[in-house]
Amino acid sequence: MTPMRSSAEPTGGIPTQAPGRLRAVTIVAHLTFIEARRRRILAAALLFGAAFVVLFGIGLHFMARDIRANAPPAQQAMFLNLVTLTALYAANFLIVMTSVLVTIDTLAGEIGSGVIETLCTKPVSRAAVGLGKWLGCWLTFVLYALVLCGGVLAVARLVGGSTPPNAGRGILLILLEGTVLLTLALVGGTRLSSLANGVTVFGLYGLAFVGGWMEQIGTMVGNASARYIGITASLLVPSESLWQLAAYQMQPPIARDVQIGPFLTASVPSPAMVGWAIGYVLVALVVASHLFRTRDL
Amino acid sequence: MLRPARGTASRFSRWRSRSSRRMVEAPPALEARSLSKQFGAKVAVRELSLTLPRGEVFGFLGPNGAGKTTSMKMLLGLVRPTSGEGRLLGEPLGAARGRARVGYLPEHFAFHEWLEGRELLRFHARLLGVPTRGLDAGVEERLRRVNLADAATRRVREYSKGMKQRLGLAQALLGEPELVFLDEPTSGLDPLGRRLVRDVIRELRQRGTSVFLNSHLLSEVEVTCDRVAFVKGGRVVRDMRLGAEERDLEVEMRLERTTATLVADLARFGHDVRVEGDRVRMGVSGEETLPEITRWLASQGVGLYHLGARRPSLEEIFLEVVADDADAVLG
């Protein structure tokens, strides 16, 4: 057995100085990203994301061939946009699920297993640990979302020959929607077990989903109460309204004007909702930091 | 040839003098004043007060559920005390500057099992703030010290329980800590592993590093610790040094007659005087008390048929201290 050297000898790693907050965040974020890779979360997400894009491409190929043969150019454009938006709607749902799934266990799991103890006895703040985990999960989610949305848009362009209007803005709104839910999963993970956290965040997503549709239907039928309840739900969890804003942005102007199709937006969420969502994420991060800092481990 | 500038020697002397004074005045490794922790109605730790001087190996003993791990977690800033205060290496509990100089091996040791052993130590060294230059050398040295150099590139999930425990020990030694907390460090280890832990603790003591040890293996504690405290029901009930010369003797006598007055009078020579059958037992501070007792008994005209003295083992003391705890479990 090799005895340790005396402290007077130049061993590696002494003296230590607590890493700065930014350095600590990047160390933890890097570890969290490696975790997604090593535990094959990233590989599974990308594999099935790629399968989704390929399937969409094959379907679009056959649909585009038929529609080009049978419909006038204006209808072709409308139809291809509708198909692309449908694919993006499905992609949005997968992105929402993935943003929550990659995050629900990151704090809750390590608190439950005790892994967090050796992290939080290092000279780094719990806020830095939480923020690092958020950043690592966010990078994983963004990579997945870009592959999925980028794949759908690339297929729409290459196979269908069209790109939805304001596609970049729409993708950013989808990313913001996922970021909202991912951050909620981090907040829940500071106090709840992984399973309870997942149930809670998906429950909140469900509330936002129902609220979003209540707002649309309430507007269409002129029911102010339903509309206000929907808006309130959207303020509490602004995920669905961000998708509706994204869908509105990516529809052709004529579809917006005549209010046709499954993605009709009777009550267009205010652009201020974007500012609200960004503020919501920042406040949620502060709340997560506080809840994590003040809990016993 | 470079010559020292005028006054360099005196400046150096002053620096050395200040430095020595700092060494002398260095705050204790650990101070706790009336630390308490309550979970709902349950009091886990009650008024814990203790001081751990620099370089001391301290054993924290008690039955399961006595509050040992909660105490350790409070000192490390993982659990917030309900009341009381403490300092770690002179810094308030939970302060990053204190934690930078502390190593910790938790009881239920769990790590990121998808990392390789070497990667895991590098990650912890970076979090600890170990400078990049020399980080790898420090990690390799710890891996060799715990005999895991050959397994450094294996994923932690492939490690045996003992290997994980040794990796945890290596993690606790990163960054040259001034105080190391070890919570049941020998659990899951074979005799060779236990010896490794014992040797590491000895080396830490030689370097002047303080060690706070939670353990149920009293034989290990007996050979490694300078001082122990017994905790029961969340409260420290006895604090004693473990040097043979400093531990009280247990005296056993068989006398011609035993009266209440005699027993009361014997108390002047020691403590815990009690009659058990035809024997009188008591604790005394040292061997020099034995002739004093025999002379006093003779002066009282009491015949002494048998007198024996021995130092009780730590296990005996432990059992005596936790005697009324039905659930006291050793090992």
Image (cartoon, coloured by chain):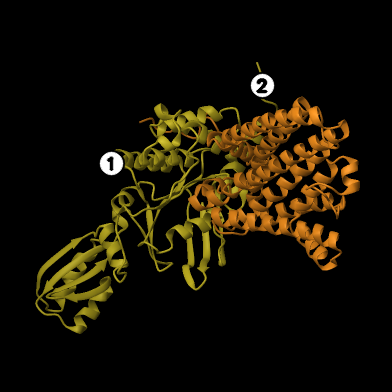
Answer few, some or many: residues within 10 Å of disc 2's Cα (few below 14, many 20 plus, some between 14 and 19): few
Q: Earlier in the sequence, mark 2 or mark 1?
A: 2
Q: Amino acid at mark 2?
A: Arg
Q: Nearer the viewer, residue B135 or B3?
A: B135
Would residue B10 appear left or right of B142 to someone viewing this image? right
**Which chain identifier belongs to the yellow chain?**
B
Q: Nearer the viewer, residue B273 or B187?
A: B187
Label 2 chain ID: B
Q: Secondary structure beneath disc 1?
A: helix
Label 1 chain ID: B
Check if mark 2's residue and mark 1's residue have beta carbons within 8 Å: no
Q: At which x and y percent is residue B105? A: 45, 46
Q: At which x and y percent is residue A79? A: 80, 37
Q: Nearer the viewer, residue B331 or B47?
A: B331
Residue occupied by mark 2 = B3
Residue occupied by mark 1 = B191
Q: At which x and y percent is residue B216? A: 33, 55
Image height check: is A175 above or below A43? below
Q: At which x and y percent is residue B313? A: 25, 57
**Which chain identifier belongs to the orange chain?**
A
Would residue B188 appear left or right of A50 to someone viewing this image? left
Would residue A240 appear left or right of A128 to someone viewing this image? right
Q: Residue furthest front?
A: A70
Kindly identify the residue that appears in the image at 67 percent across and 53 percent down: A184
Image height check: is B235 above or below B60? below
Q: Amino acid at mark 1?
A: Pro
Where is the C terminus of chain A found, in terms of image quarters?
bottom right
